[in-house]
Amino acid sequence: MRSGPRKCVLFDVDGTLIDAVENQRRVWAAWAGRYGLDADEVYRVALRTRPMETFAVVAPDQDPRECLAALHELEDEDVRSGVYAAFDGASELLGALPLGAWALVTSNYENRVRGRFARTALPVPRVIVDAAAVTEGKPSPVPYLLAAEQLGAQPENCLVIEDAPSGVEAGLRAGMTVWGVNAAAAVTGVHRHFTSLREAVPDVLAFARLEGSAGVE
């Protein structure tokens, strides 16, 4: 039985639980090829902006709705045929968390997340907050606040696991504890930093009160 406030863990997906860097690079390269653009430049912009913002920078003369439709087509095909891998520790960690104690908060779309999780045999939680669920994406706190609300948890009792600056900022603005994973150097603002997801597993489970307790460093 739990005692005290309800603790929940909120996970980013790409770069945190699933290694999709090469998939994203291939998708953007294919998209750039359709418009006769430099693939490296397009990917460099896409890494720091949302799709509609990327199109405005790299293809301002194109219809952004058509650009988005083309990107979605390529992303959906990649989910069906691409090769994906879960980060070491992801299966163990998600499998150990109670179903109602964790959620996914992603800038991607739920159908693609479910497809990637099926390909990597990861369990799927009850709550997934995707790009279609909110009008403001990361670094806005809205996605993380919505996930906490749907889990019935207060923001101060939520742990965010992220790999990217925009996601870290979103978690911090939501008033949550934020831990960074899968990076050699800590993202500015994180309360704790782990070079890999595997390294973080014991402490994430501890936060969730499955293996004692963990504080913030």
Image: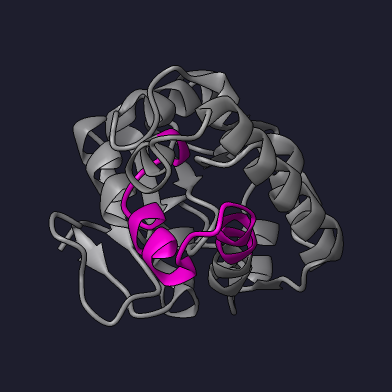
Q: Is residue 152 magenta?
A: no
Please say if 142 is above or below 83.
above
Instruction: Residue at 47% x, 45% y: name it.
Output: 9
Instruction: Residue at 33% x, 35% y: name it.
Output: 157
Residue 78 visible at all: yes
Tell me the colour scheme of the image: one colour
Q: Could you tell me how many numbered marks the image carries?
A: 0
Instruction: Residue at 23% x, 57% y: name it.
Output: 215
Q: Which residues are magenta?
A: 27-52
Return the residue nearer the eye: 160 or 136.
136
Instruction: Residue at 77% x, 48% y: name it.
Output: 76
Q: Is residue 42 magenta?
A: yes
Q: Residue 178: horizontal and vertical position, in percent?
A: 28, 50
In the picture, measured across the screen, residue 72 lies left or right of residue 159, that is right
Q: Residue 163: horizontal and vertical position, in percent?
A: 37, 61
The image quadrant that residue 91 belongs to is: bottom right
Please say if 106 is above or below 141.
below
Q: Residue 191: horizontal and vertical position, in percent?
A: 18, 57
Return the residue nearer the eye: 216 or 185.
185
Return the residue nearer the eye: 164 or 27.
27
Q: Quadrant of the C terminus?
A: bottom left
Residue 153 visible at all: no
In the picture, measured across the screen, residue 33 lies left or right of residue 160, that is right
In the picture, measured across the screen, residue 118 lies left or right of residue 163, that is right
Q: Residue 144: horizontal and vertical position, in percent?
A: 40, 31
Dominant secondary-structure state across the stretch colored magenta: helix
Q: Quadrant of the N terminus?
A: top right
Please say if 156 is above or below 159.
above
